[in-house]
């Protein structure tokens, strides 16, 4: 039974780290005039309204992307800012793009996009959010387990590309499974950029997973973590992290900029 709904957390500080780094990597990868594959294992619904009751209730977006935009802390020419502006042009001033929508705005007509989203309502909402772009993009949305989908299509065609793994970690075993899944994906697709997002919780649940990932000594591996105050008193998430295999050129610089930004925010 899946109960996680990203609308409560869309645009929070963890999304800022994830989406800023993702947008920068996609921006870099699309500079070369060669098509690429973009895959997501846990896509979410792709489009959020930050004035929706759920988002207002937690106030996470207010302390996250809304604060960055209000205080001009995200450069207007940052690819994430461009994806937000394009989303707002079509869906209004409170709209915020999830990762599938960010990729849809930053990728080109010859690129191929594949998404897995298991939750029936989130899956239906994602299909609807991406429908207006259907004619201009080669996009497939699957309602199946994202890890299974990724393993079944790696290596994709085109072979150049990026895979985002962004679970909600509702299933505690995900922490233990992920290093093995990433090792398998890398064996099947050695040129693929594999990007994992994880929460930093007060109980340090992510630590054994990171130890196992780093022990694999994968090429171009980059680990980036930021910390921030809990969204509410007693909330267990106090930061977030990204682990990237075959990190594209420029990822390290963007990670360093984000580290500075998060220091500034706190
Ligand atoms: C953190 S949210 C995704 C957010 C999205 N990547 C973004 O940044 O906009 C995780 C999503 O994974 C979905 N999900 C959970 N388990 C899944 C699975 N095994 N396969 C595919 N999707 C799953 C949930 O329904 C939820 O919508």
Image (spheres, rainbow, N blue to C red):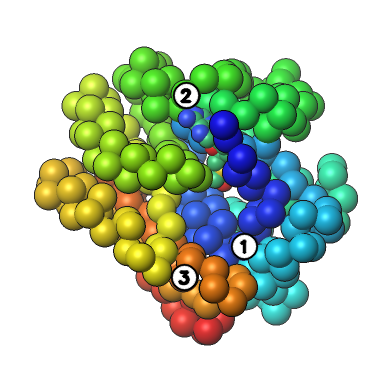
User: Residue 154, how many percent across, how many down?
Assistant: 33, 20
Left or right of 232 in this view: 206: left
Indicate the quadrant where residue 64 lies.
bottom right
> Considering depth in this image, is 149 or 1 the residue closer to the camera?
1
Check the image and report above or below for 150 versus 235.
Answer: above
Q: Which is nearer the N-term, disc 2 or disc 3?
A: 2
In the rendered image, which residue does mark 1 sit on? Answer: 12
> Considering depth in this image, is 234 or 240 the residue closer to the camera?
234
> Which label is found at residue 145?
2
Residues under labels 2 and 3: Cα distance? 28 Å
Is disc 2 placed on a helix, strand or loop? loop
Indicate the quadrant where residue 138 lies.
top right
In the rendered image, which residue does mark 3 sit on? Answer: 238
Q: Are marks 2 and 3 in contact (CB under 8 Å)?
A: no
Tell me the crowding category of disc 1: few under 14, some 14 to 19, or many 20 or more residues within 10 angstroms, Cα based.
many
Residue displayed at 48% across by 65% down: 237
Which quadrant of the rendered structure holds the N terminus? Answer: top right
Indicate the quadrant where residue 173 lies.
top left
Tell me the crowding category of disc 2: few under 14, some 14 to 19, or many 20 or more residues within 10 angstroms, Cα based.
some
User: Residue 220, how many percent across, how many down?
Assistant: 22, 48
* Count of labels in the image: 3
- Indicate the quadrant of ligand 1 in the picture: top right
Tell me the crowding category of disc 3: few under 14, some 14 to 19, or many 20 or more residues within 10 angstroms, Cα based.
some
Is disc 1 placed on a helix, strand or loop? loop
Q: Which is nearer the N-term, disc 2 or disc 1?
A: 1
């Amino acid at each position: 039974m899946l109960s996680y709904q990203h609308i409560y957390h869309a645009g929070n500080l963890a999304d800022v780290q994830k989406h800023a780094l993702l947008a920068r990597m996609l921006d870099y990868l699309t500079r070369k005039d060669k098509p690429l594959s973009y895959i997501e294992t846990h896509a979410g619904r792709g489009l959020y309204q930050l004035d929706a009751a759920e988002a207002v209730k937690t106030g996470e977006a207010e302390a996250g992307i809304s604060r960055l935009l209000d205080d001009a802390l995200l450069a207007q020419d940052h690819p994430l800012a461009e994806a937000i502006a394009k989303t707002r042009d079509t869906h209004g001033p409170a709209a915020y793009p999830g990762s599938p929508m960010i990729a849809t705005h930053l990728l080109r007509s010859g690129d191929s996009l594949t998404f897995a989203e298991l939750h029936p309502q989130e899956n239906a909402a994602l299909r609807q959010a991406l429908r207006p772009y259907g004619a201009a993009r080669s996009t497939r949305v699957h309602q199946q387990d994202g890890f299974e989908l990724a393993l079944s299509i790696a290596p994709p065609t085109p072979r150049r590309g990026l895979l985002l793994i962004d679970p909600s970690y509702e299933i505690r075993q995900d922490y233990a499974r992920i290093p093995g899944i990433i090792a398998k994906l890398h064996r099947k697709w050695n040129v693929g950029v594999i990007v994992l997002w994880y929460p930093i919780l007060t109980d340090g649940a992510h630590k054994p997973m990171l130890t196992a990932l780093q022990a694999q000594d994968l090429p171009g591996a980059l680990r980036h973590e930021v910390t921030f105050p809990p969204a509410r008193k007693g909330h267990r998430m106090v930061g977030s992290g990204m682990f990237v295999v075959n990190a594209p050129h420029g990822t390290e610089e963007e990670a360093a900029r984000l580290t500075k930004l998060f220091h500034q925010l706190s």
